[in-house]
Amino acid sequence: MSCERQVSKKALDPVAPIYKYCLISISNILTTTCQYEALKYVSFPVQTLAKCAKMIPVMVWGTMIMQKRYVGPDYLLAFLVTVGCSIFILFPAGTDISPYSRGRENTVWGVSLMVGYLGFDGFTSTFQDKLFKGYDMEIHNQIFYTTVCSCLLSFTGLILQGHLLPAIDFVYRHNDCFFDVALLSAVATASQFFISYTIRAFGSLTFATIMTTRQLVSIMLSCVWFSHPLSWEQWIGAVIVFGSLYSKNLMKKASQKPPPPEHTLDGASSPVKALP
């Protein structure tokens, strides 16, 4: 029994310094704040378009924080995926909403908020990747302490801004929203496990690639589900994105393929190279 308690206590102990968990919490809160605040100043399609550039800030932060060295094909892939998704969103078929349509003003402040969103979001996933690689850290350990820090920071922010009592009063008057809040919390928690596992197993750049292409896939599925036509520009954008990703996988598999064994005169393979 004591051994089980010791193991469970060890699993709950913070592996990294608390301030490092707080850095993830702060950047995550700033990411969410910039994302939703920007909707007051830029249209939703423009925000969706900006999210296509996720891979670029992740590569910048990866170079600065983790001293990663990206080669030319990595930058080319990020550029092609960004361009392909941008083309797909900019040129919808028919009367679908596009960033060129009249709507919310795209102000300098709104664009600045989107730049802040991309910067903080890139830092969050990159720093999560750094903690996983720098410490022997389990997924639930990072999620637990990051969530605790986020709760404390959010609670403090509500008090300082004087929004705590109005929030409690709103929930009291609209108690039917408890189910919605619980559902959103459950989905967010489940998605956080998938996000953390992806970052730990494959890295922050792969996660950014998945999140970028998710924008395109979700729109394509929506078009198929609701029988919306795709313009020829959207087909070109989709081909650019998936062609780039497929080409990268082919090149990666080709580079990992072991060299063929050398053969002797009698046809048997020999692991020892012949001397010149």
Image (cartoon, helix red, strand yellow):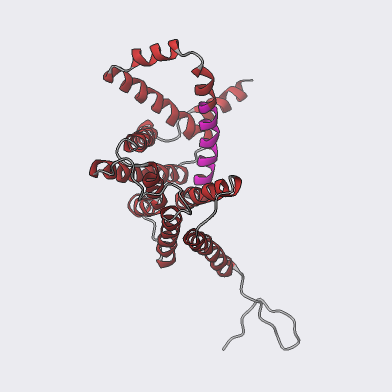
Q: Height in image: 104 above or below 241?
A: above
In which quadrant is the N terminus drawn?
top right
> Quarter of the image holding residue 267?
bottom right
Residue at position x 36%, y 24% in the image: 154
Q: Height in image: 140 above or below 70?
A: above
Coordinates of residue 14 in the picture (x, y in percent) = 45, 30
Q: Height in image: 165 above or below 86?
A: above
Coordinates of residue 198 in the picture (x, y in percent) = 53, 45
Main SS, magenta region, reads helix
Tally of marks: 0
In reply to whether residue 143 is colored magenta, the answer given is: no
In reply to whether residue 192 is colored magenta, the answer given is: yes
Which of 226 and 185 lies nearest the eye of the viewer? Answer: 226
In which quadrant is the C terminus drawn?
bottom right
Residue at position x 52%, y 60% in the image: 235
> Quarter of the image holding residue 78?
bottom left
Which of 33 and 119 lies nearest the eye of the viewer? Answer: 33
> Quarter of the image holding residue 63?
bottom left
Which of 205 and 179 lies nearest the eye of the viewer? Answer: 179
Which segment did they paint magenta?
184-199
Most extreme residue toward the front is 95
Q: Height in image: 210 above or below 137?
A: below
Coordinates of residue 247 in the picture (x, y in percent) = 53, 66
Report whether 200 appears left or right of 20: right
Which of 81 and 200 lies nearest the eye of the viewer? Answer: 81
Report whether 23 appears left or right of 180: left
Coordinates of residue 176 in the picture (x, y in percent) = 51, 15
Residue at position x 43%, y 31% in the image: 146
